[in-house]
Image: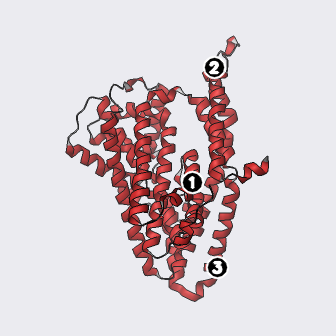
Amino acid sequence: MFKSWQALTLWKRVLVGLVLGLGLGLAVRYGTPESVNADSARSGFERAAAIGDTWFKPFGDAFVRLIKMLIIPLIVTTLVSGVTAMGDPKKLGSLGARTIGLYMLTTLFAVSLGLAMGTLIKPGVGVEYNTASAEDLASVTGKMAAAEEAGGFVDRLLDIIPSNPVAALSDGQVLPTIFFSLMIGIGILFVGKAADPVRHFFDSAAEVVMRVTMMVMELAPYGVCALMAWVMATKGIEVLSNLLWLAIALYAACVFQIIFVYGFMIVRLFLGLPLKQFFRGIADAQGVAFSTASSSATLPVTISCAETNLGVDKSVAGSVLPLGATINMDGTAIYLGLVALFAAQADGLQLDMSQYVMVAMTATLVSIGAAGIPSAGLLLAATVLNVVGISPEQSLLIIAFIFPFDRLLDMMRTLTNVSGDIAVACTVAKWEGELNEEVFRNEAEV
């Protein structure tokens, strides 16, 4: 039995865990009776939420913490190792420019797709968003206040340069860690042969961290099961009905972005590579991304899929993918365009073409800084809603209305982000002559 389970590829085991967690959470949600103790009477739903918080959430949180434990070591070791593998500092400049340019282009297309899908499906028509609970309003208010304390765009841009690299590493600050790791890698390249011991250290460390990562990922099905059981036990299936059309619009737009933009346009037409192998190769990363709802948490699997299944050289995978996990937020861009239309439709506002353009530009630019902001989607949504004339008070109500449902939306946004990261990595790798097409065209095990 155990051997048969282990014989399944990771994404299949994650999917099984997802389905089991869904069923378990719903069983707890709708099968828990009301409290019979008159002194502490609680509804069945309240007791189910307590069970979810007590029994499921800790196991899910433990899995997420294990992954987060590896993010900084993985970024440092793979990024330094990847940069030094280039052999030529000039190569880093062309790679960086191409990477950022591609990420910007796919993000702009994503937010335009979100606007088009929102115009077609009209998820906000007839929605009464004033029903947001006081608890959700308070939670969203606190998160938005915390996000505003992070400062404006210029402040966040300056924060990329760490004044204390050790503190940045210990605090888990991703962008400053990327910047510092790039500097170390470039320094090793310029020093040359004398830095070989340092280069070998980072190469070996990268291998060790990747092996530990694969050990942790064996726990993914169980962590995913716990996380999904917690969501369903605390929120229930009724959360789906509140924002059904918004969810349909987001999932449809994300699927279109993944299949048509990443798959057909980039992989098939632009790179001339087979779609089947691409989607087989990224299946594990997609499964983990959907279940954890975190691009950074999925990064170890993303790098492994790109290198092992698709033949992306570690010099590209180790630099492009950590950057993508931080700045490539195509799923978020789609979401922001949809939320802007959702709010306008709920308020009965008619947007003109200039407002559509402003939403597209604003969402593209602000989504780049999403990873550096606490509760990023909340603040970014408020920023984009302001563009279409939604007042701060109305924005708060709309965001609080969506807030209970956001986890299920975020899962699909993250899957889209990770798929885009790998598509861009494959593109940059081919441009740089660092893509092993023989490995790419081999059918990955599914």
Kindly identify the amino acid type of the residue bearing the numbered disc 1.
Ala
Asked if disc 2 and disc 3 are in contact, CB closer than 8 Å, the reply is no
| Quadrant (top left/top right/bottom left/bottom right) for the C terminus | bottom right
Residue located beneath label 3 in the image: 200
Label 3 element class? helix
Where residue 270 sits in the image (x, y, percent)?
Answer: 38, 65
Residue found at x 20% / y 44%: 353
- Which numbered circle lies on residue 44? 2
The residues bearing labels 2 and 3 have C-alpha atoms spaced at a distance of: 58 Å
Residue 228's quadrant in the figure?
top right
Kindly identify the amino acid type of the residue bearing the numbered disc 2.
Gly
The residues bearing labels 2 and 1 have C-alpha atoms spaced at a distance of: 38 Å
Residue located beneath label 1 in the image: 283
Tell us which disc is closer to us: 2 or 1.
1
First in sequence: mark 2 vs mark 3:
2
> Along the line of sight, which residue is nearer the eye, 83 or 16?
16
